[in-house]
Image: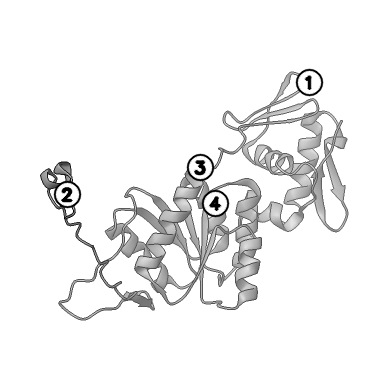
């Protein structure tokens, strides 16, 4: 007869319940900015940490207003603009940009590139362009994610959360730029050359900072106009400010003209 150890007799038998995950809820699509669902039936939506400042850039006013309203219902501080030039003036004050590609004044890819050239603010492209090529071009332009219309509101909220989570782990953008004798303090907007302070206007500083952020690259004239001036510019705006900037820096070699293309930062 087999003997059962006394310790085993004293130990109670514990049954471990097996938990079965519930069936996933279907994704609720949002078409024309109007949430779906049956009347009177509550719809579960995912939420992200409240308090995000989100810029919605969409050429269709109704779509922008609808998405802004939905984001506010989820506790976010959101604003909507219809034009790419307006987005280039507003992105600095937000935590995230939701960017459509179909805009009345600029192509959304150009807006994305212009933002990414000088900022690390997260950008999610939200567009009706559904081809693989469009997605690839959007990601290559600097977007952090790509969502096609119509989309599920819960999916969009989850993607926002994921993008913001990744952004929190990224190192902050450089607050100082050094290029030879040139020193730019981005936070205080102070510029010195060889230790001597240089007084610049706001636009002159923005122009210099944009060039200095890409010291080995040529910045196209069109990008300079869009990024620094938005809609308020004339044909010779860049040339006038470049000439003034060269004079204040003390040497024309600091800003090099690449004929037919744009400008790049030089060394004096």
Q: Nearer the viewer, mark 3 or mark 2?
A: 2
Q: Nearer the viewer, mark 1 or mark 3?
A: 3
Whole-number angstrom distance, CA of label 3 to CA of label 4:
26 Å
Vertical position of residue 195 compared to residue 247: above or below: above
- At a point 17% along the width and 46% down the height, the residue shown is 8
- Residue designated by label 2: 4
Q: Residue furthest bottom?
A: 38
On the picture, is 236 further left or further right than 22? right
Disc 3 is placed on an element classified as loop
Whole-number angstrom distance, CA of label 3 to CA of label 2:
56 Å
Q: Earlier in the sequence, mark 1 or mark 3?
A: 3
Whole-number angstrom distance, CA of label 1 to CA of label 4:
32 Å
How many numbered callouts? 4
Q: Earlier in the sequence, mark 3 or mark 2?
A: 2
Disc 4 crowd rating (10 Å Cα; few below 14, some 14-19, many 20+) is some
Q: Earlier in the sequence, mark 2 or mark 4?
A: 2
- Residue designated by label 3: 169
């Amino acid at each position: 007869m087999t003997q059962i150890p006394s310790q085993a007799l004293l130990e109670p038998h514990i049954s471990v319940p097996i938990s079965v995950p519930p069936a996933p809820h279907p994704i609720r699509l949002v078409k024309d900015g109007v949430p779906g669902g049956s009347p009177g039936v509550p719809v579960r939506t995912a939420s992200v940490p409240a308090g995000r400042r989100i810029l919605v850039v969409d050429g269709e006013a109704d779509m922008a207003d609808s998405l802004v309203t939905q984001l506010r219902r989820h506790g976010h501080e959101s604003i909507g603009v219809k034009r790419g030039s307006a987005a280039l003036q507003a992105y600095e004050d937000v935590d995230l940009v939701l960017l459509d590609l179909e805009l009345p004044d600029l192509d959304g890819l150009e807006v994305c590139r212009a933002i990414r050239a000088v900022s690390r603010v997260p950008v999610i492209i939200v567009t009706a362009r559904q081809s693989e090529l469009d997605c690839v071009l959007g990601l290559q332009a600097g977007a952090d994610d790509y969502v096609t219309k119509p989309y599920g509101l819960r999916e969009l909220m989850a993607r926002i959360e994921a993008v913001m989570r990744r952004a929190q782990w990224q190192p902050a953008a450089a607050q100082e730029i050094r290029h030879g004798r040139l020193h730019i303090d981005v936070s205080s907007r102070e510029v010195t050359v060889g230790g001597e302070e240089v007084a610049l206007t706001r636009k002159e500083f923005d122009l210099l900072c944009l060039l200095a952020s890409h010291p080995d690259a040529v910045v196209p004239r069109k990008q300079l106009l869009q990024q620094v001036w938005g809609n308020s510019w004339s044909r010779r705006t860049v040339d006038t400010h470049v000439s003034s900037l060269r004079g204040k820096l003390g040497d024309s070699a600091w800003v090099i003209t690449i004929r037919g293309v744009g400008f790049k930062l030089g060394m004096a």
